[in-house]
Image: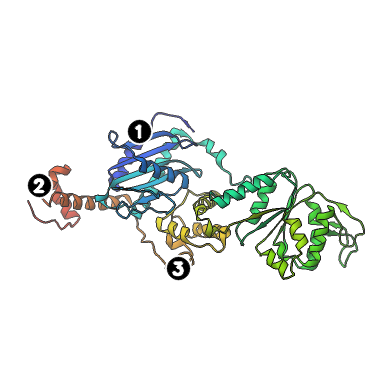
Amino acid sequence: MIKKSSEPLLISKLICIIMEVIISDCASVIVVDQDKNVLYEQSLPEDNFKKDDMSLRVIREVLTNKNPIMIDAKKAECCSKDEISSRENSKKNILCMPIIIKNYPVGAIYLERNCNFGPYSTRDLEFLIAFQDPIKQVLKNCFDFNKINEENFFNSKPLIIGKSKSFLRVLGLINQVKDHDVSVFIWGESGTGKELVARNIHYNGSRKNGKFIAINCGAIPEYLLESELFGYVKGAFTGANRSKPGLIEEADEGTFFLDEIGDLSLNLQAKLLRLLQEKEIRRVGDNRTRPVNVRFISATNKNIEEEIESGNFREDLYYRIKIIGIELTPLRERKEDIISLLNYFVGKYCDEMNRERLYFSPQGLELLINYSWPGNVRELQNEIQRCLILCGENNLIKEDFLSSRINPEGRLYSSSSYDFFKAKAEFEKRFLNQALSRFSYNKAATASQIGLSRQGLFKLIRKHNINAATEG
């Protein structure tokens, strides 16, 4: 990103408006480069706002996780248990949200205030989300964000997303096996991404220029599956009016993926074993063989050892297909990957729907992180699509929009029509109550300290129907 013009002076005015609506001791707008180094920062007050380690950690987490963080100093909580675990002796409330352009976090809006003023609310977050648009427009006029297009990976090679130890182990195995023509066996629960791992092996490895052919062994009847896999010659059976190569032949020089191989019949298991041993194929009804050069990757959600014990799967085939084994951990056992996956799918589907980036409410995010996800990544992906449709024009994914299985208690979000003038009125009322309380309801002292005439103070007290004790 390259700065195109002088420092955006309008940012200071926009920060003033934010601080007037959302009472804060200090506020910042920060712009970072692709390595998260600060390119620009505008803060109010300008002279004495120094960020401590905790503030910097919050900003880093917001930039990494692409979701807002709200911290209540008294409760020592934040919107996600994965965010900012260390909060020793904190005496300030924090609200921080990312500035996202083209699904890339280009900066952040950071607010903090003393705990005496109370925690920030979800309504404050709503206002900040709505008010970020003018800030984005100013920044777009001052900085060149065009290079962010290079970061858009939604239509590139298939990705697997995460940062957990089990994910990194899988990533390491993919890297080790991708350039070797050995059989790979992947097992894990439904929805954990077995085919995605297989595609990563193919498209990142030495066979990427060949075809990737996938078939679900349990989705096709056995009497059709053999001809689909191995092909057939003309006259092999009724209706075979011409010869047709099978899917395995189509994958020559590439990769063939057998999903749910545990559903393969014993008859076809024997034919597959011969293929793996001889590296040649015989079409149905043919009396000659054809050589094939295919890497085989297979997957199942079954316990193959138990299938072998019960006589449903050949042990010799099992050792042929499992030269390299990759086990995929269920999502409930790698919760640290949930936010990364959420961000990926939100960014992907917002991009496809041509809409601005959406965020999760703190309560909604907590429900998503704590859910057990029996359907694993596939269930999470479907839930995100559902939420994006149900939230309509909202830019905040609230707990109301979550499925009943994720929000079983039916937690409701108290919505608000948060326009500027209503927010300003609420700020005035809250500020006057706090000021009167601080000066023991002495109206003369209160008016003097907050810069109002006594008459002006009385006018605002009447306007907001404040019950002020008469002390002077």
- The disc placed on residue 444 is 2
Q: Residues within 10 Å of mark 3 (few under 14, many from 20)?
A: few
Tell which residue pokes out farthest to the bottom in this image. Answer: 310
Q: Nearer the viewer, residue 331 or 209?
A: 331
Q: Measuring from the top left, give residue 158's x and y in whole percent.
A: 63, 48
Mark 2 vs mark 1: give the one in front.
2
* Distance (Cα) linking label 2 and label 3: 53 Å
User: Circle 3 is placed at which residue position?
Assistant: 408
Q: Tell me the residue at 28%/45% (across/down).
A: 20
The residue located at (89%, 55%) in the rendering is 289
Instruction: Name the element at disc 1.
Output: loop
Q: Secondary structure at mark 3?
A: loop
Q: Is residue 231 left or right of residue 163?
A: right
Q: Residue furthest left?
A: 472
Amino acid on which the number 2 mark rests in the picture:
Ala
Q: Quadrant of residue 462?
A: bottom left
